[in-house]
Image: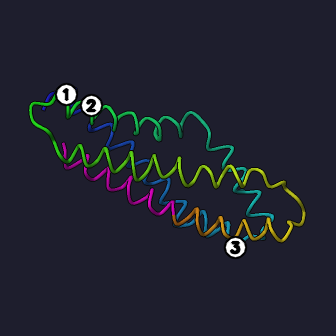
Amino acid sequence: MTNVEYFLLLLAAITSGVVAGIFFAFSNFVMPALARLTNEQGLAAMQSINVTVLNPGFFMVFIGSALLSLASLTWQFTLAVSINYYAVAASLSYLIGCFAVTALANVPRNNALALISRQTALSSEDAQYWRTYLQSWTAWNHIRTVASAMAMLLFIFAL
């Protein structure tokens, strides 16, 4: 293993682990806390979170880990003397189970939630969407949590 490959895998392990921690926090206590609020308060809080999460720090680890995973896959199939299957599995775990799930499941739910206006009293349809959102978004987040944690472990094994 070259120094470049080692550094690539180490950074991928660290960033996917940070992402796993972020998603674990949401599954473990953020979403349950929002569920304890009134529908209006919970919805407003999540809308605010969805705006503030779009920042350089989060993008650096979330998108950075995806780019490192792509770089790892590229390395394994073009530059590596022998394929490190742990690195391949780690990369695929992050790219499919975390990045793709985010794009295909969580972000569309966030976008739909953003369309609900913040009112003192939600309509029954908006309140129902919020309750459904809490369950479905969190279920998909569990998948992202496991996938990014698995990626971290597999990147460590790859080292």
First in sequence: mark 3 vs mark 2:
3
Badge 2 marks a residue whose secondary structure is helix
- The residue singled out by tag 1 in the image is 78
Q: Position of residue 142 (x, y in %)?
A: 47, 63
How far apart marks 3 and 2 lie (CA) works out to 45 Å
**In the image, which is nearer the foreground, mark 1 or mark 3?**
1
Residue 155, image x and y in percent? 26, 46
Q: Residue furthest right?
A: 120
Dot 3 crowding, Cα within 10 Å, few <14, some 14–19, many 20+: few
Left or right: residue 105 compared with residue 150: right
Q: Are marks 1 and 2 in contact (CB under 8 Å)?
A: yes
Q: Residue at (19%, 27%) from the top-left corner?
A: 78
Q: Quadrant of residue 147?
A: bottom left
**Label 1 sits on what residue type?**
Thr
Callout 3, which amino acid? Answer: Arg
In the picture, the quarter occupied by the C terminus is top left
Label 3, on which residue? Answer: 36
- Mark 1 is surrounded, within 10 Å at the Cα level, by few (under 14), some (14 to 19) or many (20 or more) other residues, namely few
Q: Are marks 3 and 2 in contact (CB under 8 Å)?
A: no
Q: Residue at x 68, y 49 (%)?
A: 111
> Residue 126 occupies which quadrant of the picture?
bottom right
**SS for callout 3:** helix
Instruction: Describe the element under mark 1 as helix, strand or loop.
Output: helix
The residue that appears at 56% across and 64% down in the rendered structure is: 138
Q: Which residues are magenta?
A: 140-159
Q: Does the magenta-highlighted stretch encompass residue 147?
A: yes
Residue 150 lies left or right of residue 57; in this view the side is left
Say which mark, if any, is on residue 74: 2
Q: Using the numbered discs, state the Cα–Cα distance from disc 1 to disc 2 in whole angstroms.
A: 6 Å
